[in-house]
Image (cartoon, rainbow, N blue to C red):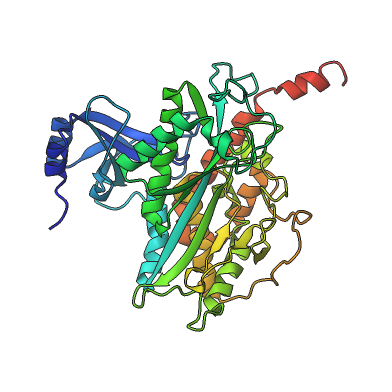
């Protein structure tokens, strides 16, 4: 028997429903309405939302577009009932449901972030394949401040003192914020977010959450909801949680590493391994595809001006697409382990990336590699910190995306065009801002 959404809403005594979609930045957009109005809307054809929401910039601006309808027509939201979850931080019983969008004629809104990932997954599905994904998300805790001009500050924990020395994998450092993390775990449990381990990363009050592996769309949904959950829980504890790629000048950046493997739907076996446990041709083809196309997809994994401040070439943030066994200085790390679980870790995406798009970019490169059957470079057995081959800023990354025509076919021509429009506009908006560095060094010296 299928899931009965209306019955579930009644059983949970839901009074309000959050109807969520991801915009191009990964920000939750949509509508909140009483449960009775939500049900009646489904019976009368579905909720409506302006199409231009999917082209909204991170600053909330709308721009002229060659993709979006110029008169601002509506699209129809369709709930994905597999995503029905409770919202744990409200007093009133509230549900959240991720929606897909369709045009008036029923056609999918192909340039929505979730639709982009679904279209990539459809290619694998038609070939009898299923990607398996496991994201890792890093974030910083910082003191709350309403002054956007002030540098962010590491907050004190339960001891009353803020971290000064780096505490990578420090147990006591995590325990400094134990009440917050207990709440995060509780919220994730209520929502069915399948998180695995929590650890302290290299930065001051920088944490990492690993997700258990699973279906790519489900994991993208979970990462999308997790970022919202962490931010909300931090606010409840009078802190801010930030997924900026580089929030503080003297601290390391935050990544969203994406582990990927592919299994055969018929056999259930990992196609990256042969029956004797050795690396398969498909494994090497997938690496080659990532090496060939992830530079063109860089803007989807590093979508803001700030994203490129994380790109230091160090072990924490490789700036190359070399690959190696258990080598954290290369962009494509192959973790050691059971051949049945052989996977590739894409270490390039920042924590600021839209999870749907970072995963879609990763899988698009794998798909193209499987189709083109190229061979990768030799595995790198030494440090790759001196190897920098990826785009150095957002403008260069967008140029690379526009040139990567095979990616356009996999991700969707309209999506790529819309994405470039929005990101060019955001980059231009940044250039209008005069920074403290300019005032400090140029005011009286030039």
Left or right of 8: which side holds 192? right
Left or right of 305: which side holds 228? left
Task: Compare residues 72 and 161 and report the one nearer the observer.
Answer: 161
Task: Compare residues 300 and 239 and report the one nearer the observer.
Answer: 239
Q: Is residue 61 above or below residue 340?
A: above
Residue lying farthest to the right in this orientation: 445
Look at the image and tell me whether residue 70 can be seen: no
Residue at x-position 68% and y-position 35%: 251
For the C terminus, give its image quadrant.
Answer: top right
Image quadrant where residue 393 sits: top right
Q: Position of residue 363 (x, y in %)?
A: 49, 61
Q: Position of residue 180 (x, y in %)?
A: 45, 30
Q: Position of residue 115 (x, y in %)?
A: 37, 52
Task: Compare residues 336 and 315 and report the one nearer the observer.
Answer: 336
Q: Is residue 269 above or below residue 322?
A: below
Q: Position of residue 72 (x, y in %)?
A: 35, 35
Residue at x-position 69% and y-position 22%: 434
Residue lying farthest to the bottom in this orientation: 276
Q: Is residue 24 above or below residue 211?
A: above
Left or right of 288: which side holds 339? left
Look at the image and tell me whether residue 38 can be seen: yes
Residue at x-position 34% and y-position 77%: 266
Residue at x-position 61% and y-position 26%: 154
For the N terminus, give its image quadrant.
Answer: bottom left
Q: How many marks?
A: 0
Q: Is residue 287 above or below residue 10?
A: below
């Amino acid at each position: 028997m299928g899931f009965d959404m209306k019955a579930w809403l009644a059983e949970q005594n839901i009074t309000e429903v959050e109807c969520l979609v991801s915009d191009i930045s990964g920000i939750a957009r949509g509508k909140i309405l009483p449960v009775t109005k939500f049900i009646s809307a489904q019976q009368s054809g579905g909720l409506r939302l302006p199409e231009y929401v999917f082209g909204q910039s991170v600053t909330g601006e709308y721009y002229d577009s060659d993709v979006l309808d110029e008169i601002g027509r509506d699209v129809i939201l369709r709930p994905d009932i597999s995503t029905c979850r409770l919202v744990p931080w409200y007093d009133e019983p509230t549900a959240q449901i991720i929606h897909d969008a369709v045009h008036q004629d029923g056609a999918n809104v192909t340039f929505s972030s979730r639709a982009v990932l679904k279209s990539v997954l459809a290619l694998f599905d038609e070939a009898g394949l299923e990607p398996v994904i496991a994201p890792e998300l890093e974030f910083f805790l910082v003191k709350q401040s309403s002054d956007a001009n002030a540098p962010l500050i590491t907050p004190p924990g339960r001891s009353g003192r803020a971290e000064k020395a780096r505490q990578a994998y420090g147990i006591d450092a995590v325990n400094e914020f134990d009440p917050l993390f207990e709440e995060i775990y509780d919220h994730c449990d209520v929502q069915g977010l399948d998180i695995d381990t929590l650890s302290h990363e290299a930065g001051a009050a920088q944490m990492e959450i690993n997700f258990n592996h699973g279906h790519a769309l489900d994991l993208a949904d979970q990462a999308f909801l997790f970022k919202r959950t962490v931010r909300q829980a931090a606010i409840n504890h009078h802190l801010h949680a930030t997924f900026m790629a580089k929030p503080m000048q003297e601290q390391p950046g935050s990544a969203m590493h994406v582990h990927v493997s592919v299994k055969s739907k018929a056999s259930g076996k990992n196609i990256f391994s042969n029956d004797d446990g050795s690396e398969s041709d498909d494994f090497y083809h997938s690496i080659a595809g990532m090496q060939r196309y992830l530079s063109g997809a860089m803007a989807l994994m590093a979508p803001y001006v700030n994203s490129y401040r994380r790109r230091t070439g160090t072990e924490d943030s490789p700036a190359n697409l070399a690959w190696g066994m258990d080598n954290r200085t290369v962009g494509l790390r192959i973790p050691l382990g059971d051949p049945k679980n052989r996977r590739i870790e894409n270490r390039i995406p920042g924590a600021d990336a839209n999870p749907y798009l970072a995963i879609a970019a990763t899988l698009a490169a794998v798909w193209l590699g499987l189709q083109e059957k190229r061979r990768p470079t030799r595995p790198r057995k030494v440090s790759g910190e001196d190897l920098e081959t990826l785009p150095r800023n957002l403008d260069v990354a967008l140029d690379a995306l526009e040139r990567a025509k095979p990616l356009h076919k996999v991700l969707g021509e309209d999506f790529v065009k819309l994405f470039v429009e929005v990101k060019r506009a955001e980059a231009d908006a940044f250039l209008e801002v005069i920074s403290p560095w300019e005032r400090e060094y140029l005011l009286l010296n030039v």
